[in-house]
Amino acid sequence: MLQLPQEQSFALSLGVFQLVCLIFFAVHFETITPKSAEALDSPNRADGYYSMYMDVHVMIFVGFGFLMTYLRKYSLSAVSLNFVVGVMALQWGIITVTMAHQVGEKHYPKANIDIPALINGDFAAAAVLISFGAILGKTTPTQLLWMTFFELIFYAINETILMESLEVIDAGGSLVIHTFGAFFGLAVSLQIGAPPSHEQHHNTSRYTSDIFAMIGTLFLWMFWPSFNAAMVPSDGFRQERAIVNTLLSIAASCASTFAATQVLATAKKFDMVHLQNATLAGGVAMGTACELALNPASAITVGLVAGAVSVTGYRFFTPALERRIRLSDSAGILNLHGMPGVLGGLAGAFATMALSDDNYGDVLTSIYEAREHRSAHEQGGYQLLAIVVTLGMALVSGTVVGMFLRSPLLFRQQQQKYEDEEWFHLPGHVDLLPLGSSPPSQREMDSTFGTQSPQTSYEPMSIKTS
Amino acid sequence: MLQLPQEQSFALSLGVFQLVCLIFFAVHFETITPKSAEALDSPNRADGYYSMYMDVHVMIFVGFGFLMTYLRKYSLSAVSLNFVVGVMALQWGIITVTMAHQVGEKHYPKANIDIPALINGDFAAAAVLISFGAILGKTTPTQLLWMTFFELIFYAINETILMESLEVIDAGGSLVIHTFGAFFGLAVSLQIGAPPSHEQHHNTSRYTSDIFAMIGTLFLWMFWPSFNAAMVPSDGFRQERAIVNTLLSIAASCASTFAATQVLATAKKFDMVHLQNATLAGGVAMGTACELALNPASAITVGLVAGAVSVTGYRFFTPALERRIRLSDSAGILNLHGMPGVLGGLAGAFATMALSDDNYGDVLTSIYEAREHRSAHEQGGYQLLAIVVTLGMALVSGTVVGMFLRSPLLFRQQQQKYEDEEWFHLPGHVDLLPLGSSPPSQREMDSTFGTQSPQTSYEPMSIKTS
Amino acid sequence: MLQLPQEQSFALSLGVFQLVCLIFFAVHFETITPKSAEALDSPNRADGYYSMYMDVHVMIFVGFGFLMTYLRKYSLSAVSLNFVVGVMALQWGIITVTMAHQVGEKHYPKANIDIPALINGDFAAAAVLISFGAILGKTTPTQLLWMTFFELIFYAINETILMESLEVIDAGGSLVIHTFGAFFGLAVSLQIGAPPSHEQHHNTSRYTSDIFAMIGTLFLWMFWPSFNAAMVPSDGFRQERAIVNTLLSIAASCASTFAATQVLATAKKFDMVHLQNATLAGGVAMGTACELALNPASAITVGLVAGAVSVTGYRFFTPALERRIRLSDSAGILNLHGMPGVLGGLAGAFATMALSDDNYGDVLTSIYEAREHRSAHEQGGYQLLAIVVTLGMALVSGTVVGMFLRSPLLFRQQQQKYEDEEWFHLPGHVDLLPLGSSPPSQREMDSTFGTQSPQTSYEPMSIKTS
């Protein structure tokens, strides 16, 4: 940044970013300090929300982090950068979302940091990490930090518009998180550009990295019901319904993915990229409608469609977009978050219009506050409007931020695409063996590891020279 | 199936299976729709059961999935097929168990899908995935789907007989889940047959796959208390007692496994197969008795025996059964689930007869409903009968389903045993590099990965040709 | 031990250890047996503590276990020995801590094993596994068992002194767990000695083992709020405050680690050792003060300092200590647990003195029982004294136990440092292929795995001979 050496630009950017967070927390937030004996008898808020919060936390750091380890030479970067970006995003997300709502309400009290605030921080981190997926392997850590900083300002504005002005429902964030994160990331990636094909050697997986990525996939898949239900109020079985609807939908997207990958893939074999990603599309697509009184078959149908659309995207859309408009989407977020997110928004709008108020009885306005003064069709219209607003906000702000990040005056660009080596010490350097020690013999290595010994790789070299 | 090309048979089977589930869910199940304001004040069912359900969910998808990645060339299949089979089994299990109980009670109302129903779905998936262990690497995905479909019908019948007719306790499923799943799977495997030794090259592990398998082992081991306690009612500390008894038992089986593996194993070294599996036997063996008022030392003793029996099985019984009756048991489910399951059934029966009613006071009949009209010894007799019934159901139905699956008219059989390649796109194909790009130099690869570069493998080839 | 062959010494030691635990559980502990109908209506203790207990459980077995898989040839040992040591430590820890408190109170009733007891068992296991980190790869499994046995006696004495005599707060164990475990382990390691440099070939990581270690790091990092809050009473939002303070602190240590590693590391690149470990220092450092009414910025500042101190330790202190006083600290526990633990003790003492009683109101004496008769400054003085007591107890008892473990009369020492092979069957031996089978062709292996085939390693050998 500003022509600083790369390591200084990163450490300086991180330091400034953390300092900004520290100042906001110091002056505008406060701890929970109940002072009366009554507080001793109040229900323990650590019970209600906390175990779901931990599930969401696992999705952010292990789920997203390991899902992105699939690249064969970028696994350390994927899991590590996901870690630090997640940490900065959750802090900054708490601040920006709190501030945006206060600006919306024109009321600025000191805010508490409690467990719901932490969940909102993780939700904000999810949006940023989705965007990260589009540019995985193509940007420097410094650029990622600044993307996080700016993205969350627009994220918070969009969230506030949807919740406060449009008064829509979106408990699991089909729109606020997935649609916004995906189209913001795609807009950034379009600005950054697609690497030429000779820089794409390493834009592929290894056998081992494909297994690591499944750790991410499975933790995301298993805990998605917690993600969608975490912020649903626990009254009136709404939280339980959000859990059940999400489970049915994400189970269905797993099923349709396994069917679709084999039918559509080359050579009619399972494609791990599809299994790692499209299996999750049903969770994304149930983010808006999860708390509604859907028939179980409707939830399953949404998931089936989401999985099939997602596989189709990976198989046909992503390569076509890269060929035609140089839009490179490393992890295929259009297919996992973009299209299923919009589908989720549509499902929410349609269910809002189609389901009879009889399904809700007295609970109706605790789900849709605005139904005090809106008809079901009006509410459905606002739900549709929210999709358009989110798409517009994401594409415009993503384009602006992308233009900023690609500026050669401000940022050095990533040199070795899809490779750890530019930023990470890597193990396995033969010359790291202590001086004077003889390397272990070939025989010894064989009997221990088969081929994973660091010796094998230069053994052929010694043959050449002899 | 019916001589369809393999990819069509799988996608078609999966589509039909999912359609059957969809229809049942559409016509016979309904969502949770509380309509009165009172519902707003009802306790949140998402609290009580949900965090244990998520633990069970992790056991099914990460626990079983990664435990089976131990094969050196079948890791992608193991984790992926575990995923899709688990997803179909949990849907179909909800349906079959619900329907079997309704048939038992001759009463057919529309059923709710709530969190306890989801736990029952995961329990059903556990039984199927245990059976999968016996035939790991030897059947096609299509065969697995049809095994799942038929197994769960018999599973639900057996579960209903045990719970409704015999009125036995089995909260953690020593009988219903582990004994049934294991002996069903062994009966299927006996029909499928054991591969000749020249097809068993790959029936072994790699260094890395042994570590991946430990992910599965540990998540199963840690969350087993949740598995056994999930469906125990939370009244009267029963759930807490189920947790404590299971923890003590599974800790003890870990200890006896580490002792036994070293004493019994060849060369007196730790055998990872034992550590990955037999350490869990104490959880299986505490599935029936977990909620009873056992002395802590009794719970530990059950676990110690289970671990030792399991190691003995891996060391001596499994190879002997393959040699003598061509019974191939890939993951050793006889040792992890079969024998410990029966042991758990015996422990439950014995504890039922031996423990004084004074331990339970007024709580007695909320544990054993049938104790209203049965003596402790009668109840113990029914517990023993349940073992026999389960073994009989499992062996007969498993044999029938195995004969169906091995039919060459209906199913193509797996060609390459214990290998992903028949069904999965595998990474690392050199010809996937973009045309015109030069491969990275050997030196570059060395400095990055040591030996894990995709180049090493053909480097010797180029030497040969030069 | 006593010149027994190694495998017998291990199995015998483990058997004796487990027998001692069994006897204590049989004679001095009892199960939970509520007998009255009222018990049916009591709140379910499985709700309140249980989901946090499971998080702690994951930290002990997956967190510590995988964190220590980073060594390139010791991953199986790391995760397996962590497993069995954890299992013995949690049993023995329940016993020693219960007995020490009973000795302190001179009152010896039979004790219940309930969920809080299980959490205390896992806390004890954490202390032992921290000590294990210092001697990773340098001691035999037998030595580890005996270290566990003796360490937990001193651990329980220290814990009882701090809680009963000094009456200090330390909910997350900055002192009781981290400081004690670290300095005990360092004292043991100083006695065991540092391997000469020619035995340190394998004291380094592989690309894959670095990724496995991140599984451990992330689960520790995510669940640390549960660790610190698990034993905080749930009244008065104290548990929620412990969660929030820990989250903010550990997030900050992640941020300062990423900045510091790049500034301080050689070649200005990220060092995975730092990212795997120092990111967690903020959780350690918030172990004492977590339940206090800290300003959010204070919690963040503690974490920032902890992360920076930890990276500095890894970069400069650990190598210097090994060079100058032959203190080998394999996993760098001085930097992850020792210094941040002391920092946490200081932060707790300082916050105790600095924060006004107005922050607590009526809740004050439910946090600090001794504040009934102590001023804030007196309490702070006792908090400082607790640091000194813990350091003294740990260093003295660790030295004694270390001298015992290094005795050549009693214990065979580890021969192959940092290697699995001495104790584990390893896969991948070519001669394990069934006789008469031809190995798969090179071409077949290439197309499947790239270079991870077990064949590659001897392919060059065959070239040499041709």
Image: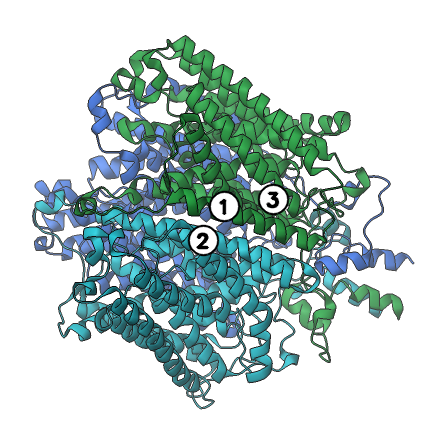
Chain colours: A cyan, B green, C blue
Front residue of B252 and C309: B252
In the picture, measured across the screen, residue A426 lies left or right of residue B111, that is right
Q: Secondary structure at mark 2?
A: helix
Tags 1 and 2 touching, CB below 8 Å: yes
In the picture, measured across the screen, residue C412 lies left or right of residue C318, that is right
x and y percentages locating residue A399 in the rendered image: 41, 84
Label 3 Cα crowd, 10 Å radius (few <14 / some 14-19 / many 20+):
many
Are discs 3 and 2 both within one chain? no
Label 2 Cα crowd, 10 Å radius (few <14 / some 14-19 / many 20+):
many
Residue C162 position by quadrant: top left
Locate the N terminus of chain C and report the quarter of the image it occupies.
top right
Kindly report which numbered mark, 1 or 3, lies closer to the viewer in this rendering: 1
Front residue of C460 and B182: B182
- Mark 1 — on which chain does it sit? B
Locate the C terminus of chain C and report the quarter of the image it occupies.
bottom right
x and y percentages locating residue C250 in the rendered image: 34, 58
- CA separation in Å, label 3 and label 2: 19 Å
Residue visible at 33% across and 49% down in the picture: A241
- The disc labelled 1 sits on which kind of residue? Cys
Q: Indicate whether C45 appears above or below A61.
A: above
Reading the image, the residue beneath label 3 is B145
Front residue of A141 and C124: A141
Name the residue at the bottom extreme: A409
- The disc labelled 2 sits on which kind of residue? Ile
- CA separation in Å, label 1 and label 3: 13 Å
Reading the image, the residue beneath label 1 is B21
The numbered dot on residue A300 is 2
Residue visible at 51% across and 60% down in the picture: A307
x and y percentages locating residue B210 in the rendered image: 61, 45
- Mark 3 — on which chain does it sit? B
